[in-house]
Amino acid sequence: MKFHFELVWLMVVLVVMIDAYLFWRWRKSDLFNHLTGKLSALFLFGLMPLTSIIGFIHMGWRMPTTDSAQIYVDFGWFLLFFLMVYIAKFFYTGFSALQLMVNRKRRKPEEKVHHYPRITRRKFLSQMGIIMATAPFVSLLFGAFQGRFAFYTRHLRLSFPNLPDGFDGMRIAQISDLHIGSFGDNRDPLREAVKLVNAEQPDMILFTGDLVNNFAEEVNGWETIFAELKAPMGKYSILGNHDYGNYSRWSSKAQKEANFAGIVDGHRKIGFTLLRNESLVLNRKGDSIGLGGVENWGTASQPRKGDLNMASQGLKDQPFNLLMSHDPDHWDKQILPQDFFDLTLAGHTHGMQFGIEKGDFKWSPAQYIQKRWAGIYREGNKFLYVNRGLGYHGLPARVGMPPEITIIELRKGPVGTEPLKA
């Protein structure tokens, strides 16, 4: 896995600054006068930051060179522990600094003295610091043990005037970003997800990339579980950025190519037809539409192997065309300008595995990285749907951004979208 060492050193600096400040405040408290307080300080501001720093440096050194899929599981739990502790410390540091500023302000002579119980600003800030420090700790804990497996099925109806009558009412199940190695040997969650997909009785299942974290071996043992997925019109998939094995430094080109070949074969093993800049014609009730699948096309350092021209070959005469493209940035950069595919399905963002969605309001740090990061988007008569991902990567938690199964019902009619209840 590629590891950005500048981020490692940034984490080290933040850890040192936060713990140095908190230790300074701790020394000024009455707790430091007791042995228990001194031992607590040694653990909280000595052993804990030292362990975190060593852990980040070790992971940063190990991840690019290992050929074991277990590294992603190990790093995920290490990252979870680190964030639970240091996000809490970060919030408490902020409120502690505010409290210190309040303490330095002198009470004006004319200020009235209240003789009834009243919470002071100092006490208020102290209590708020404790609350704000506790909230992320509890949220991450819940996201790790419940949120990452709280599969959520989203239903959506999309209408197109050019959809053939034979496809009116067709149901598509979209899943994305399995990152199957992150589950380790825990088969039960995805076994439950497969049951949820089948319960929707989709006509077709489309998987929009990132089968693995990096290694072909991650697929081993999952074949029988995904073989249970049922769709009369077929199961189709594409590659995501993690499916190329680019997150390791391989000892040879041949080793990397063998790993990639294993990942490609992994799609077949779990029962999906992989489309690599390819297309096919789907038939239903005497009518036909086109389905294209491109390889990953991403911005920045992501692989750009997607070829829209190849993926649209053989579909020029189809009245309606559907495309699978892993990275939603591809939609604005190439797919919309080509003006060929009516509906594009993507994934990649995971909704950052963290966010808030309430009614029409949605927020996630993902929106500061990618323009299209979750849900439905429309430009004219063209649509993009970005799935929030079924698995998880890196942090083994989801907070406010549950793993998603998308059910899209295609209807013939005026261009529009309508949410459907489960």
Image (tube, helix red, strand yellow):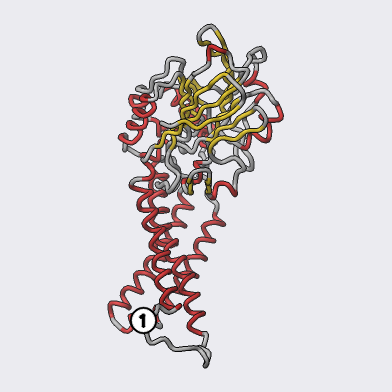
Q: Is residue 195 visible?
A: yes
Where is residue 316 shown, x and y percent of the image?
67, 15
- Residue at the extreme right: 337
Total of numbered circles in the picture?
A: 1
Q: Is residue 259 visible?
A: no
Where is residue 301 shown, x and y percent of the image?
62, 42
| Residue that appears at 36% across and 56% down | 138
- Residue at the extreme bottom: 109
The answer to whether residue 421 is above or below residue 273 is below
| Residue that appears at 51% across and 57% down | 8
Q: Residues within 10 Å of mark 1 (few under 14, many from 20)?
A: few
Where is residue 364 shown, x and y percent of the image?
52, 48
Q: Picture quarter containing residue 380?
A: top right
As rendered, which of 356 and 260 lies closer to the eye?
A: 356
Residue under label 1, please give it: 117
As rendered, which of 365 and 49 lies closer to the eye?
A: 365
Where is residue 185 shown, x and y percent of the image?
32, 37
As rendered, which of 108 and 38 lies closer to the eye?
A: 108
Label 1 sits on what residue type? Pro
As rendered, which of 330 and 374 lies closer to the eye?
A: 374
